[in-house]
Image (tube, helix red, strand yellow):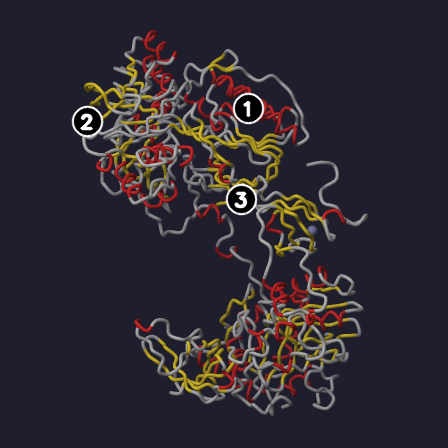
Amino acid sequence: MTAQTRRLPDGGRIDRGRELTFTVDNVEYAGHPGDTVASALLANGRMEVGSSIYLGRPRGIVAAGAEEPNALLQVGGECSEPMVPATVRALVDGLGARTLSGLGHLDPASDPEQYDKRFVHTDVLVIGAGPAGLAAATAAATGGARVILLDEQAELGGSLLASGEERVDGRPALEWVADVTARLEAFHAVTLLARTTAFGSYDDNYVLAVERRTDHLDEPLTHLSRQRLWHIRAGQVVIATGAHERPLVFAGNDRPGVMLADAVRTYLNRYAVSVGDRVVVATTNDSAYHLVGDLLAAGVDVPVVLDARPVLSERAAETAVSHGVPVRPRAVVVATHGDPRVSAVEISEIDDGGQLVGGRDTVDCDTLAVSGGWSPVVHLHSQRQGKLTWNAGIAGFVPDGVVRNQLVVGSAAGEFDLDATLAAATDAGFEAAGRQGYPADVAASRGVGGWCGPVRPVWLVPGLDGEPGEWREHFVDQQRDQTVADVWRATGTGMRNVEHVKRYTSIGTGQDQGRTSGVVATGVIAAALAGSGAAPDIGEIGVASYRAPYTPVPFATIAGRERGDLFDPTRTTPVHGWHVDHGAEFEVVGQWLRPWYYPQQGESMDDAVRRECRAARTGVAMMDVTTLGKIEVRGRDAGEFLNRIYTNAFKKLAVGSARYGVMCRPDGMMFDDGVNLRLSEDRYFLTTSTGGAAGVLDWLEEWSQTEWPDLDVVFTSVTEQWTTVAVVGPRSREVVSRVAPDLDVSGEAFPFMAFRETTLASGLPARVCRISFSGELAFEINASGWYGRALWEDVYAAGHDLGITPYGTETMHVLRAEKGYPIAGQDTDGTVTPQDLGMGWVVSKTKDFVGKRSYSRADTARGDRKHLVGVLPVDGSTRLPEGTQLVAPGSPSAPTDGPVPMLGHVTSSYQSEALGRPFGLALVKSGRERFGEVLLAPIGDRLVEVEVTSPVLYDPEGTKRDG
Amino acid sequence: MLLLTCPWCGPRDETEYHYGGQAHVPYPEDPAALSDEEWAQYLFYRDNPEGPYAERWSHSLGCRRWFNVVRDTATYEVLAVYTGASPDSQVPGTPTPGHPGGPR
Ligand SMILES: [Zn+2]
């Protein structure tokens, strides 16, 4: 095991009382609670991580947070996790991981962890718990508002967790953080969430955040979900998400040991890790001078500070004097040396035009800390279409105006000075709470720190030789291995738009989504275009759109508990248990589980369906049709309403009678169908397709409420209230007479399309209909769903000696298709009229109804529309796959002939027991004029001949209907 | 995720609602009297402005009532919720949007 040789003897926010061991790439290391994997690796002297994705170049840890481009891990476990930045994963005892070269591995194992969700409302949501967020949350909470303060870090404090000499209210900043945290915890209306990343910001202040609840625990607590997805609806959102430091672009800027200055400082102050013994600092602004002071205080050698600005700022000059460190103005790094970690850097001066001037020096070092300026973390603002503007003072994109009910504070708003941030954030907290009705006013804390000063943006340090198009070691996006040469290639093709360059080069598309490279890329694009006419400035180029999620979120977290059986509700009928007991295979229809067929011992599906069909056509069979949608329509104007909705008339339907009805959209296209009963003068009972029930109810409600509110009519879904058993076949009358002895089931007393109320032999009140979806004599018995299974079992027992055979949806489909009965949504697709289906008889010529006007439109009235027809494979044996296209014989079909003219397609296809052959239904252009014609069906590489026929293939005369 | 205020139920998440397209496009009084072009206008053509847009919503997972919303299609800000022919035509005694007693 390696030792923590880089750990400082004291300081840092780690628990030195415990030592943790972990392995990365099978090497054992030690660390402490409070470490990230990255800080512990650095404490053990390991800088290098996985080599780069395409070029295989050695890479090191660059950052100390979510912006890290290189240090990606595959973290082991029962289900390993890919693409985890070592800079954010908390160290736990026994952690095992391997470094990645830009690509993780999605573990096919099932994730055994629990994930859950919470849905909360709050007056004020503060995102980010650095100085700005803490001040804003405190201000908002004092007036009594409900406040949620969340932060991605393990503890509150944000940038102050890495602070050194910064002070608030005259004390070390971290003491203030502790005090404020304690104050916030005391408010009962305040929720503090650490380890929680707000990753998506949506309309009306709906924010999604992921809380990592167990990854930091050595012993997983089985009662805790691993991650929790917070759905937060906030009255006001205060964005205090800070800023990311930018790297500098120069030759060899990806060498291990080249790190962001603030990351070096974070490892030093927060984790008590000195990443090197001799650190050169290269900066474009004042923020790196915080690091210089801290390094020297920790005994780390700083041989030189390179400041790109032409004149030393007050801060730079003071550092030079007080610490005795050489600070060189106009100085940049032009090359790095090392094997692979940096061992020396070459230094040059850069003039105001960005050209290298004068000689070069070489300085030995083991670390190069760079600061190319800061990019405010404006992602959540941008996700809500908040505008950005270029702020030349800080050389960064900042929010331009505000999103409704949002405020942006601190460095996210481009304010780096600690005192100004505390004042503005306190005001923002008051403002947010005040808007919610909780005014408050207390004095803002006063701070010292947060240096930034004037920034000299240096987007591109020229190479020592060659042209920019050849600078292949000037890295813009380390994770995507993209360089200045790649940007030049993109702009060379004529691209000027940052979104185009992003997609052409892939800059910003990695796991880090360009957190460090995005604005740098914009700067390099600006440099590339600078020579061209009407060159855009950097603000005009802008940055590629920021989209959710801000950091990657596992699909398991998004799914939460809605996986497996809980993914979608399953609806079953009261008879379901019987179906299971009798070996049914099930089919999913909408959310319903319906028996598909009931295989007996040794039967294939085809065998079972043939047996079930035979029973229905020659004896008696039964089916659970409870899933058909059922809607009661009640009111004085129920008949008038249905007359307007259905294509045929219902107003004058006699009480006790049933009628098949079709409803269409205003464009005349069929939408659903079903058999409807008239229960009484003001009550109808509609049935709908199984999948269409909810849509039909919505449709009726819509027309009732929005078009005809004057009609007295109400709608009630009663699908679940009734269990319906279809009894089908020539011997069905006998079975029904046994189950319903009080009912006269003779053809004269109980004609087709009538229904009767009766009391069954069991004492159960029932409504019996003579309806057929098979062409056979058939009855449907409806009784209360509470007694559904008893009803089913009674029918089964009553038909036992007649060989009554339960059948499923497959047999139902065969029987109805043999009769040419279409199914809405299978044989129709929203472009089919009743006339197309050969059901002109169901379309009233006298009354008006929704869609009627459309039948005189030219497109609807033309003769060559697609018609529903039967199709018979000429070979008598091929079962056509549903969806098979149909083409005319002799259609040119070579690739050079262009698209083959399609005449239609097969919508339903089955093996018919009654016909002894496969058959299908199809929608075919001018189909009714093609009866007898042979078309071709391309199946795989075969062309199968099919004959077009009438869709009614079984008992066209209807002799079976009355038994 | 829009926050829409049902005139009957109060503020609820967008996922409780069903969108119904442009408001105030009534089913023609006498479709048979329309030319093909006029009927096609009703069937197929709707406005698509950038800015305020009157549209229909139904609280389909709640009270199942339809109502109208004026929403800015660029900012997604809901400018009015109403049940009558226009935001100003709210009938006295019928539900008005919003909770009594302020923004909580
Ligand atoms: Zn409602």
Is A556 rendered above or below residue A956? Answer: above
- Residue identified by numbered label 3: A117
Mark 3–mark 1 distance (CA, rounded to whole Å): 30 Å
For mark 2, give the secondary structure: strand
Q: Residue A337 carries which label?
A: 2
What amino acid does circle 3 point to? Answer: Lys
- Residue identified by numbered label 1: A425
Mark 1–mark 2 distance (CA, rounded to whole Å): 44 Å
The image position of residue A126, as x and y in percent, is: 55, 31
Q: Quadrant of residue A861?
A: bottom right
Q: Does the residue labelled 1 lie within 8 Å of ligand 1?
A: no
Mark 3 or mark 1: whose residue is earlier in sequence: 3
Rate crowding at label 1 as few (under 14), some (14 to 19) or many (20 or more) other CA atoms within 10 Å.
Answer: many
Q: Does the residue labelled 3 lie within 8 Å of ligand 1?
A: no
Residue A603 vs residue A290, the one in the foreground? A290
Mark 3 or mark 2: whose residue is earlier in sequence: 3
In the image, taking residue B77 as reference, residue A224 lies left or right, namely left
Mark 3–mark 2 distance (CA, rounded to whole Å): 50 Å
What amino acid does circle 2 point to? Answer: His
For mark 1, give the secondary structure: helix
In the image, taking residue A687 as reference, residue A866 lies left or right, namely left
What amino acid does circle 1 point to? Answer: Ala
Tag 3 and tag 1 share a subunit: yes
Q: Which mark is residue A780?
A: none
Residue A308 vs residue A782, the one in the foreground? A308
